[in-house]
Amino acid sequence: MMLVTHVRLALVATLLTIASPAIAKPPIKAGHVKKSDPRVAPKLKRTDIKARVAVGTTPGHLGELRPARESVKPRDLPFSIEEETAKQLEKILRGPLRTAMTGLFVVDARTGEPLFAVNAEDHLNPASNVKMISTATALELLGPTFRYPTRVLGPEPKAGLIKGDVFLLGSYDPTLVAANLDDIANAIAAAGVRELRGDVVVGSDPTRDGIYRSIVSIDIIAGEPNTPPIATLPAHYDFIAVTVTAKTTKYPGKPRLTFKAKASTTPTGAPRVELEIGGTIGKGGVLSYKMALKNRTANAAYTLRAALRSRGILVNGEVKTAELGDFIGDAVGAGALPVELGRHESRPLEDIVASVNKWSINWLADRVIMTAAALTRRQAPSMEIAVDAMYLWLKRHTKLDKSNVIVDTGSGLSYRTQLSVRDLVSVVRGAGGFADPSLAADPTLSKAWLSSLSIGGNDGTLSNRFRGPDVRGRIRGKTGTLSTAIALSGVLDIDPARPLAFALVTNSVRPLSKIQVRKTHELLMGVLCKYAERTAKTPLAAAPSVKPALAVHTAPSDGSEATVPEAHDTALDAETAGQ
């Protein structure tokens, strides 16, 4: 027996000496900073064919990890379930991922007890996994049930007449669209208003009162040969003044139109955009041109005025800019305290966050955290205050700060981001409400956040992944994709008594094969699912029945790599590509 003990100790010592870089480093002690500076891009090392997985020790030794033993062993020392799992993980890591850098960290979500680790401390770019931080921060700042209000204020109508200006007052709603202003116009018309004898006013803030995704559709229909085509704007919408110099050709063909726009003003000083349409369009041709407008608030004001006119309300005034305080002061001076004439409220923030995380919408992720920070600080939205709010959340819930990680966006659409897989697991545990109860926020926050993650084989960016009977519906995760980074972090919902929090990230100096890396990640996750099943102490949880989260129907792609079905918002990042 003494001989067996000595052999075992010698084997462990040897493994610790020859272990490859893929063995996880010990956990960082509280107050200690990692030796590598996260503000300097790390040199990526290969996972390598000698990839080794560190496994957790026996319960009660929280935070301790050791390498899995080699297959050469005494007959009376069988592998533990953890070591068998580690061997399966190592075999997979020696496949297509061997030339890249992969980090993996898996823990008991409730206790934080580490189970498996590969390169757990190394700084990697998790791409859109950053959205886990920004959405958790936004939910904490505003609350899951918060709705962005957009209101129209003005004099109380008398006998169907609004005598005086009305103010379109927004709240930086990133999801506001023209149809929402139609709803406000409907409410005003339903109240019996038939005339607005005044201007439509908006503030000088470039986004507070505006439609953030200001895209106007201009329909162009070919005319007779050698005549100009007909360009049509939305009814009663006159923010854009169109001049058509284009011609219709004698034969059908691909449109070769040009569009030149410039900012101008009306004779009364109101903002306006002049658009010249040149070039040619083939006989019988039809084109819908999506024009992006920089003046978001003016576009919203013109859209509201057009909506009022479309409902038979006579609007005599112009569009103008004034501060809310001045508007109220002028109204009070005229003896008419402004009242609310109409209102639109966005979907609850928890629903918007679900769109962000399930469909990984980059622009919306950035706007949500920027506007959440702006509303709570009473400042204009900026990425600076958004990132500051995210760092504060990290410090409160994970003990991480700027000396440990780099975060510079709310979306993760950056090649500067640096977090380890251990850091990402801390985020999952903090945002999911699994960590120390003294740090846990309102349970409605964690419920909203967990519900926002994609469910394998069911919805979001995981709808076409993890569709096998053993894994479908049992993985809640946030995907992440850049050309050189592919990630997945979240929760394994298999054993109700012991959910597992995980993070899996692969980086490379060269563009990665999305199909190959994702397939390998799915193999790794399949092994972990089997492990969770084998170690479950309670009956396995039933796969959840879910309905897909609604996508935000706004505007065309913001320049991302993905192309997706029209049923979903097209402003997604590369995570949906290739599905």
Image (cartoon, rainbow, N blue to C red):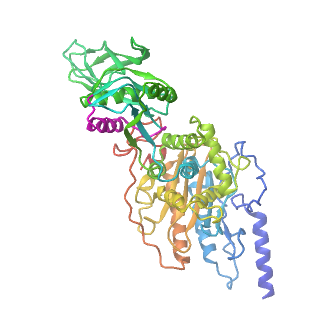
- Pinpoint residue 527: horizontal percent, then vertical percent: 53, 67
Task: Please say if 328 is above or below 21.
Answer: above
For this orientation, the residue located farthest to the left is 224
Residue 289 visible in the shown view: no
Residue 17 visible in the shown view: yes
> Is 528 or 259 nearer to us in this picture?
259
Task: Please say if 552 is above or below 285.
Answer: below
> Is 328 or 529 nearer to us in this picture?
328
Looking at the image, how many numbered discs can be counted on the residues?
0
Task: Please say if 130 is above or below 522.
Answer: above
- Residue drawn 53% across the image and 40% down it: 371
- Pinpoint residue 280: horizontal percent, then vertical percent: 29, 17
- Residue drawn 62% across the image and 69% down it: 86
Q: Splitting the image into 4 quarters, where does residue 211 fall?
A: top left
Residue 507 is a magenta residue: no
- Pinpoint residue 99: horizontal percent, then vertical percent: 62, 51
Task: Please say if 118 is above or below 357.
Answer: below
> Is 335 or 214 nearer to us in this picture?
335
Q: Which residues are magenta?
A: 171-194
> Is 2 or 422 nearer to us in this picture?
422
- Residue drawn 43% across the image and 24% down it: 334
Q: Quadrant of the N terminus?
A: bottom right
For this orientation, the residue located farthest to the front is 335
Report whether 305 appears left or right of 45.
left
- Pinpoint residue 126: horizontal percent, then vertical percent: 59, 49
